[in-house]
Amino acid sequence: MLILLQRLSSPAKYVFHTLVAYWKVVAVLAAINIVEIYYHIKDYKITRPSANLDPPFYTGCQTPILNTTARANATMMMLARNSDAGGAVASVKSIQEQFNDNFHYPWVFLNDEHFSGEFMKEVTSAVGGNAEVSFHSISKDMWGFPEWIDQERAQKAMHGMESRKIYNAGKESYHHMCRFQSGFFYDHPALTSYKWYWRVEPDIQLTCAITYDPFVSMDLNNKVYGYTIALWELGKTVPSLFRKLSDYKLRKHIPTTTIWTAMVDPSWAPLPIRRFILPWLRNRDARGNLWNMCHFWSNFEIADMDFFRSREYRELFQLLDQDGGFYYERWGDAPVHSLAAAMLLKAEQLHHFSDVGYVHSSLQYCAYESKRDAFERGRLVPGSKEERGEMLGCNCKCDEGIEIIGSTCFNRIRSTVM
Ligand SMILES: *[C@@H]1O[C@H](CO)[C@@H](O)[C@H](O)[C@H]1NC(C)=O
Ligand SMILES: *[C@@H]1O[C@H](CO)[C@@H](O)[C@H](O)[C@H]1NC(C)=O
């Protein structure tokens, strides 16, 4: 101790001696801090409900009721480029075989250009005779820089992000696409006559059969937003998104939902640091808490488009659009949809399609339930092989060669409902 003291510079010595002299005051301040931090953290604790508020609609196989007309006010939707024809065909074949050959929901294909004859021919043939197909382009007012964007600044930002290896950030059309999927798809003339939609992307695969009508089940169970995969977003793509949304939430006095809480990691720092230092860092709110990057992978989404058409969602999108982060940063539609749903919906209005195995690019969700003991330890979706119990879906065949998505994010989010 003495040696340490000798090594300290004289101002440090002064501080040290002052602390010793006023140790009672210091101790009281420290105690107050600890109590304050305890209550701050406690605010973000999720109490799991006693019953499962979001079980799968069905487990195992059902006998699909074969009607020739669609039963819900719903459509399948895919945004694709002409060059995506191969991937589009693969996705359509998988969805038709696993689901839609029994349910006959129409397909709407959207493109920012005109679809080529080749694309339309291949895709129509993949759908087969069991569902209607239509092809549409997207008008320039839904796809392109809005007037308030400084295009020079946007180009500079995109090049900067590209050199920092931020995924797809150097491609202008990718930014237009994220903006379209965040704030416009539900107003596209081809979709306005529908309430429900199932978003499908090129190169996806369903690994279980869906033998019930997910739209009807969503409706009957008062669900608004359905997903299969919850995972971490790349923080670099959206550095200021969470701050902007959480500030909006504070300003509008929007009550904190349990899903929002599940997406936030409260900070353990003392109050002054939380208030005055941490908010300057990316992905933090004005109180210094961190968005833990959990979000839903919106490339699979079964949702009520009237949610996106609501005054609340539109207002939120307007705010983000005016801000310009779709171009100056690389905000994806997945974090936008996810944080909006977390802010505006109750946990039980969301549905995890835990019975639907799904593959997209190099990741998959496998429809295993957790073994009992793992479940009791809070492993609500199994992480390791040892934790895997029965398959929840119908005729599931996981793709052995593809990585199964980890369970950390799932466990946070699912703890709000089960
Ligand atoms: C679908 O078929 C079932 C059983 O055949 C029938 O009860 C139901 O009314 C049909 N629904 C529609 C919309 O045709
Ligand atoms: C389908 O939903 C849309 C959007 O909510 C609505 O405008 C339309 O009237 C509905 N159509 C039918 C047939 O219910």
Image (cartoon, rainbow, N blue to C red):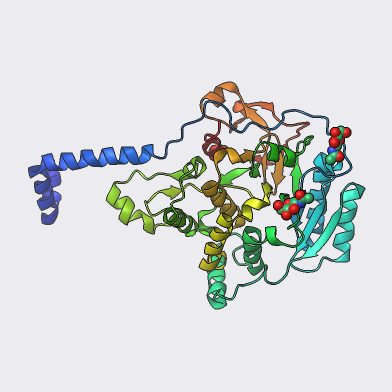
- Judged left or right of residue 146, residue 356 is right
Q: In the orientation shown, which residue stands out farthest toward the bottom? A: 152
Q: Is residue 200 visible?
A: no
Q: Which quarter is ligand 1 in?
A: top right
Q: Quadrant of residue 381?
A: top right
Q: Quadrant of the C terminus?
A: top right
Q: Is residue 189 visible?
A: yes
Q: Nearer the viewer, residue 257 or 282?
A: 257
- Judged left or right of residue 61, residue 298 is left
Where is residue 389? Give x, y as percent: 65, 25
Q: Residue at x 13, y 42 (%)?
A: 25
Q: Quadrant of residue 187?
A: bottom right
Q: Quadrant of the N terminus?
A: top left
Q: In the orientation shown, which residue stands out farthest toward the left? A: 21
Where is residue 231? Give x, y as percent: 58, 45
From this view, report whether residue 155 is shown above or below residue 405: below
Where is residue 299? Give x, y as percent: 67, 51
Q: Residue at x 75, y 60 (%)?
A: 80
Q: Nearer the viewer, residue 69 or 150?
A: 69
Report the number of numbered marks. Answer: 0
- Judged left or right of residue 40, residue 254 is right
Where is residue 330? Give x, y as percent: 56, 62
Q: In the orientation shown, which residue stands out farthest toward the top? A: 373
Q: Residue at x 82, y 47 (%)?
A: 105
Q: Residue at x 40, y 44 (%)?
A: 266
From this view, report whether residue 271 is shown above or below residue 24: below
